[in-house]
Image (spheres, rainbow, N blue to C red):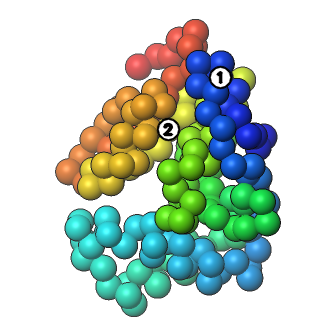
């Protein structure tokens, strides 16, 4: 994955802050726990209700630094990314950008970079989004994702590279 100050797409030459990725480390635990709360508390409260102890347990069970990359802008840690390269898809498991850094194009630039990876691999890019997270859903749809499946809580969104035919 590359970092960029401009989108690779000529139709959207949006200037974004410089961003890069680094491997997560065990000492990122507190940053990532706080980032999760800042990013998801509002949505979790609306769907299930937020319980600090339950959310801490959920975070601890999922905290696997070897599967995470820290998003950086300049010298600042600003988010987290988790992507799985599966046989039939590239799955965006998690992208969280600190609220102070949202709206500056970093998330869009990262997703564009993942779309480039998926295009090269000839497979779709997929993710899940909670229905109550309307801002994220609008972003993904603006970036070309479409609903593949939906249940009462979340949607599974899918982006297909142009020119790649898939069995449905």
Viewer-side residue, 71 vs 63? 71
Q: For the point 50% across and 51% down, which residue is it?
A: 103
Looking at the image, the residue that sits furthest to the bottom is 53
Question: Is label 1 or label 2 in front?
Answer: 1
Specify which label sits upstream in the sequence, 1 or 2.
1
Q: For the point 78% across and 60% down, which residue is it?
A: 74
| Quadrant where the N terminus is found in the figure | top right
| Quadrant where the C terminus is found in the figure | top left
Q: What is the tally of numbered marks visible in this picture?
A: 2
Dots 1 and 2: beta carbons under 8 Å? no
Q: Relative to 99, is 149 on the left or the right?
A: left
The secondary structure type at the circle numbered 2 is strand
- State the mark number for residue 126: 2
Residue 128 percent coordinates (x, y)? 41, 47
What residue did someone put label 1 on? 9
Residue 122 percent coordinates (x, y)? 65, 21
């Amino acid at each position: 994955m590359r970092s960029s100050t401009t989108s690779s797409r000529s139709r959207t030459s949006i200037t974004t802050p410089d961003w890069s990725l680094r491997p997560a480390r065990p000492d990122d635990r507190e940053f990532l726990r706080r980032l999760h709360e800042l990013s998801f508390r509002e949505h979790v409260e609306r769907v299930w209700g937020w319980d600090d102890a339950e959310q801490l347990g959920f975070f601890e069970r999922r905290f696997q630094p070897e599967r995470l990359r820290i998003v950086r802008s300049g010298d600042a840690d600003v988010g987290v990314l988790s992507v799985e390269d599966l046989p039939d898809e590239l799955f965006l498991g998690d992208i969280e950008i600190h609220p102070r850094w949202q709206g500056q194009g970093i998330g869009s630039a990262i997703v564009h970079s993942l779309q480039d990876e998926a295009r090269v691999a000839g497979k779709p890019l997929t993710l899940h989004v909670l229905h109550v997270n309307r801002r994220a859903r609008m972003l993904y749809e603006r970036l070309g994702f479409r609903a593949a499946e939906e249940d009462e809580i979340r949607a599974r969104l899918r982006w297909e590279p142009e020119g790649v035919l898939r069995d449905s």
